Image: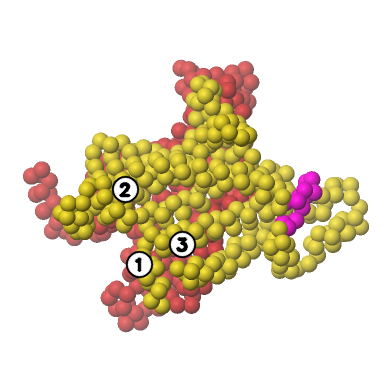
Chain colours: A red, B yellow
Amino acid sequence: MKKDNTKELSSGVKQRSLWQDAWRRFKKNKLAMVGLVFLAVLVVIAIGTIVVDIVTNNYIYENYVIKQNLRGRLEPPSAAHPLGLDEFGRDMLLRMLWAVRSSLFMGVIAILISGVLGGLLGAVAGYYGNKTDNIIMRAMDILLAIPSMLLAIAIVAAFGTSLVNVLLAIGISYIPTFARTVRASIMTVKDQEYVEAARAVGANDATIIFKYIIPNAMAPIIVQTTLGVAGAILSIAGLSFIGMGVQPPTPEWGSMLSSARTYIRDSWHITVIPGLGIMLTILALNVVGDGLRDALDPRLKN
Amino acid sequence: MYKYIIKRLLMMIPVLLGVTFIVFFILNVSPGDPAAMILGDQASAEALAMKREELGLNDPLLVRYFNYIVGMLHGDLGTSYKNSISVWSQVTERFPNTAILAICGICVALIIGIPTGIISAKKQYSIMDNCSMVLALIGVSMPVFWLGLLLVIVFSLNLGWLPSQGMGSGGMDLVKSLILPSITLGTMSAATITRMTRSSMLEVIRQDYISTARAKGVSERTVTFRHMLRNAMIPIVTAVGLQFGQLLGGAMLTETVFSWPGLGRLMVDSIKSKDIPMVLGSVIFMAVMFSIVNLVVDIVYAYIDPRIKSQYKKK
């Protein structure tokens, strides 16, 4: 305890940035750290499978991940196949590993789409206020009045189940959430003295928004992004489950569950395992999101 | 109060027009010729042209939207491409099933969520609090359809207590068939409501008027329910309202898992058979229902919180 105090004092002489401060607080939150490590492992798996595919020229992907082997259908977990075999005799462990990248990258890309578009709309609305604000936010209200899953389904139904459409569908349905978050945080920052100072110096609107306002309004946006990725991954899995997202034989947790449903009477492992994958990923994202919120804005904590 | 309700009703009109237009637009600019879909591949060019004229596909989009809205107000959402059944009759036939499911789901969520949240807040950092917070965290992270499948494995296939598919007709059968889908649908909302109740109770719990009430000798029960809960209720009601939107999305997945004959499954089936009018009708119907639920939530809001009412009276 004493040791820590002296350390803090000595390092307190150096100025710490907001981010270093936040990181120190985040590190103290064990649950959030576990979540972060889990996410890091997922990213490594996702990149690892891509590297393996490139190095082996898709050999493993084609011969083990998607190739059917009807002899070992629905085999329960064993030493040779720790997670068992699925309904077409494919190794569940390999399929689970290869599924990570679709969920993770699609979730992130979808949220990037909504983050950029929603963020921009929110920033413009919050900064200019008045009429601009009114028009943009009423449009967002309308978009928000359609449950996101419904909107996504309408888009996929109209334009077909391609990867791009699914990403766009999920991305668009999260735009209003981001627009609202960004707008709210910009409205709290925009009347601060340093923004006024920048304006007095003659900075133009774009500079003020991107250099002075956004960096200072970043905290809630980061939290929203983490939670948004969790929501997007769930939505993608949901769409795949009803056959409107990632199509088989590409491994994806939602579509794996969808085909497992047919064999639910015969074996439980092909139903339980993909769901666990989704749940743990979402859990990690939620825990990290909560941790980030507490770390970035200590006032919010209880 | 009436003034407030009327004002909210008027405000709903542009939102509804916007919502219906977005959905209408998305589903009408989709590639593919509906006439060809109805008549099949062998149809002659003239027959296709005639069908297109009949369906009004040659009109500009805005005109078609206008006609659609006028039709909707008369209870006409067009006819299905697949079997020429009236969309309106299908949608209204299926909707009550989804409504029952959604209401039972929200009941499950409230019955679990609010008491757990209250107890967690009153005994903050106790074992009970920690356990329920961990469970709530798991609850918000679980995909709805996976939970449904797990419940089916345990309660239908292994224990054989409850049916795994379909909707029972009347009495005990209906209740039995409702249990698993409602739990499936309600769990995520229950978790969200638990967390919301806990945090808004915690905000209220340390206020001075709570100490005052206790000092006056008010019983703990009255303090909890009249002084704390009433004041903590506003964010909770908001959360419940928002959950309805989630629930409608979740209903689609839950209905798929349990083969529940609701609007969500109608939608999923129609998308698979490319039956655009059916998809359009059911999506619009659901979106309108969602807006109405939000309106009701806002009115309940004003009822719970006298401040909103008085704010309005002053104007």
- Contact, CB < 8 Å: mark 1 with mark 2? no
Side (left or right) of B63 relative to A129: right
Measure the alpha-carbon separation of dots 3 and 1.
13 Å
**Magenta residue check for B77:** yes
Residue marked by disc 3: B299
Residue A253 on image: x %, y %: 53, 36
Q: Secondary structure at mark 1?
A: helix
Determine the CA span between mark 3 and mark 2: 24 Å
Residue underneath mark 2: B198
Mark 1 lies on residue: B307
The subunit letter for the residue under badge 1 reads B
- Indicate the position of residue A89 as horizontal and vertical percent values: 59, 23
Are the residues flagged by discs 3 and 2 from a single subunit?
A: yes
Tell me the magenta residue range. Answer: B76-87
* Figure quadrant of the C terminus of chain B: bottom left
Label 2 sits on a secondary structure element that is: helix
- The three-letter amino acid code for the residue at tag 2 is Arg
Sequence-wise first label, 3 or 1: 3
Along the line of sight, the residue nearer the viewer: B241 or A51: B241
Chain under numbered label 3: B
Res. A87 in view: yes
Q: Position of residue A100 (x, y in %)?
A: 49, 38
Q: Residue at 29% across / 43% down in the picture?
A: B120
* Other-residue count near label 1 (Cα within 10 Å), few / some / many at <14 / 14–19 / ≥20: few
Residue A163 shown left or right of residue B225 in the figure: right
Residue B33 part of the magenta segment: no
